[in-house]
């Protein structure tokens, strides 16, 4: 009889899914996606769970006078090939 692998939920605040999809700021998001890709490549039963940021991380821009300002983008989640489930909540009784 084949031993059943446990199902794993990987929780992370950010995932580097695409370069132009800025819901990550750097190393943590890249590490999270590398972990999930490795699990998928090895047929491991894992799912990534995170926060669906409406605007993601800010992009810093510079205007004509050299002043820095922040640029936020609203993302169209339907255009990405990922499943985004909404409506989950977590209750903490601690």
Image (cartoon, rainbow, N blue to C red):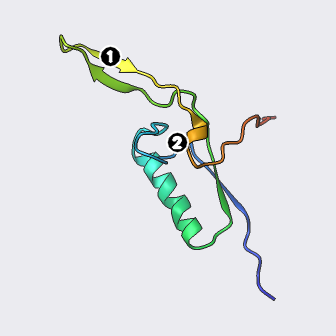
The residue tagged 1 is 69
> Residue shown at 47%/59% (left/top)?
34
**Percent of width and height locating residue 7:** 73, 64
> Residue shown at 53%/31% (left/top)?
75
Figure quadrant of the C terminus = top right
- Against 54, is 68 above or below? above
Given the current orientation, which residue lies at the most extreme front position? 79
**Percent of width and height locating residue 74:** 52, 25
Q: CA distance from mark 1 to mark 2?
A: 23 Å
**Percent of width and height locating residue 66:** 19, 15
Q: Nearer the viewer, residue 46 or 91?
A: 46
**Percent of width and height locating residue 18:** 45, 46
Q: Quadrant of residue 70?
A: top left
Given the current orientation, which residue lies at the most extreme left position? 65
Left or right: where 28 falls relative to 64:
right
- Against 4, is 67 above or below? above
Figure quadrant of the N terminus = bottom right
Category of crowding for the residue at label 1, using alpha-carbon neighbours closer than 10 angstroms: few (below 14), some (14–19), many (at least 20)? few
Q: Nearer the viewer, residue 9 or 41?
A: 41
Secondary structure of the residue carrying numbered label 2: loop
Given the current orientation, which residue lies at the most extreme top position? 65
Q: Earlier in the sequence, mark 1 or mark 2?
A: 2
Secondary structure of the residue carrying numbered label 1: strand
The residue tagged 2 is 14
Q: Nearer the viewer, mark 1 or mark 2?
A: 1
């Amino acid at each position: 009889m084949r031993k059943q692998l446990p199902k794993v939920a990987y929780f992370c605040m950010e995932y580097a899914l695409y370069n132009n999809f800025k819901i990550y700021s750097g190393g943590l998001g890249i590490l999270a996606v590398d972990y999930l890709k490795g699990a998928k490549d090895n047929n491991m039963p894992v799912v990534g769970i995170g926060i669906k940021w409406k605007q993601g991380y800010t992009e810093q821009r510079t205007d004509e006078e050299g002043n820095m300002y922040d640029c936020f983008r609203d993302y169209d989640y339907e255009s990405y090939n990922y499943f985004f489930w909404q409506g989950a909540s977590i209750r903490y009784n601690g």
